[in-house]
Image (spheres, rainbow, N blue to C red):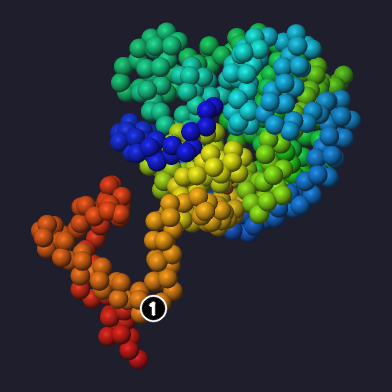
Amino acid sequence: MELTSNKFVQSATIALEDIQLKTALDRSTANANHGRIHAMGETTDAYSLRQQARGAKLRALSELPDLLEKMENNVTANGGHVLWAADGDEANQHIIDICRRHDCKRGVKSKSMVTEEINLVPTLKAAGIDMLETDLGEYIIQIDESHPSHIVMPIMHMTKEKVRDLFVEKLGMEPLPDPVDPVYMTKFARKTLRQKYLEADFGMSGGNFLIAETGTVVIVTNEGNGRLSTGLPPVHIAVVGIEKIVPTWEDFATLVQLLPRSATGQRMTVYCNMFNGPAQAEDGDGPDHFYLILVDNGRSDIYASEYTEALACIRCGACLNTCPVYQNVGGHSYGWVYPGPIGAVITPLLKGIENAEPLPFASSLCGACKSACPVDINIPDMLLSLRHDLESEQDPMWRVGMKAYAFGFEHPLLYEMGGKAAGVATRMISGITGKENIEQLPPPVDGWTDYRDFPTFGEQTFHDWWRKNRNE
Ligand code: SF4
């Protein structure tokens, strides 16, 4: 996927005018937030559970090198193969080599963000290997020749009406009358996909968790496509980022209570598949060959930086759903694989801050992301640190303005005088225009009124009110 994060402002401006996108985002984010709040409310002590999950992930990160070695030893002892990939090119080359070794030409894949990150499907296609996405959302993305806009719900940007039109155009589905029936469309897609599992030479998956103590890869899914993609073909290749490791099943048991609740508002996903290696002699089915590719692709650099905590992310998507910026501009505006608040942190870290400069500013710093995060990642603090890292790159005028702003906030008298002056100015503009609020501020602050009005300040400032009413 081409990186266009530096065009965030332009992309977001276009997205804000897209009524269909707004309709899709309003429906989906509202449902997702409602589900999460309800499902988290069912736990006896959601805050303690989140802190326990945070502890598990941070402990895993503190032992990362040892745990990865343990994982490798256990997968190998189980009869699987572990390959290490420093970057996306190396990961893709491993996969192509495995395909050539086993004469694989057609694959089926369950959902995996790391395979988006390494640009797997187009790379395989260039090598003459077909890969079919089997997660329904990813399948729709594949036939639409576009990209996911959310890390859990890839087609969050699409309405069901748009999906119907796509199925009619690309798959020859009988046109459906309104209201559109998602169940009919899902059955149609399932029928199309079923045969492909049987024809596939190899299956691929990502991994939601790696459990070091037994060398187990876990995927949590809702559609059953993960089980079919990994269990039916003779070769299974799992591609997983190194940060997905946890030491024990006990840690996994904590985290798996939170991932579905935070992602989709479910107590538990429909399927939770665990792989230790290839099928054993006593197993009735399963792949003959199992490969685990552990992908770094910039994660070691994050690990060694002040942003290590970003690697604790379990990719639930809750911070996206709750973010007022994501809710309005959607995922494509962020210009790469990981959108939303966590994307605004990890895209600059993985792709270079100079290639994603606007993203740390794509936040109101309201803190909703941290409150929603099941592992309590301090995203607002990391966004502030990234802004600080970018300070030298910023427009000198902007820097002077922000320094003046900070100076005003540090000096109460100046702050109060500034507030009074702003009050006089806003009331004057309101008097001239005859409108209660200001619809167009003058430069350099005109951007504020592009999408909302600026309120006219009242006659009495908060300081005046306080002096009058709380003088004692
Ligand atoms: S940062 Fe937290 S809320 Fe956002 S995707 Fe990761 S785990 Fe979920």
Is the distance from the Cβ of mark 1 to the nearest ligand 1 atom less than 8 Å? Answer: no
Q: Secondary structure at mark 1?
A: helix
State the residue lying farthest toward the right.
Answer: 77
Horizontal and vertical percent position of residue 60: 75, 49
243 is higher (above) or lower (below) than 232: below
- Front-lying residue, 356 or 290: 356
At 42% from the left and 31% from the top, the residue drawn is 157
222 is higher (above) or lower (below) than 471: above
Horizontal and vertical percent position of residue 143: 48, 16
Q: Quadrant of residue 278?
A: top right
Q: Quadrant of residue 132?
A: top right
Look at the image and tell me in which quarter the N terminus lies. top right
At 60% from the left and 9% from the top, the residue drawn is 195
Look at the image and tell me in which quarter the C terminus lies. bottom left
10 to the left or right of 279: left
State the residue lying farthest toward the front.
Answer: 396
Horizontal and vertical percent position of residue 254: 68, 48
> In this figure, which residue is indicated by the disc labeled 1?
412
At 64% from the left and 51% from the top, the residue drawn is 307
- Tell me the amino acid under the disc marked 1: Pro
In the rendered image, is residue 324 in sight? yes
- Front-lying residue, 108 or 232: 108
202 to the left or right of 19: right
In the rendered image, is residue 250 in sight? no
- Front-lying residue, 228 or 115: 115
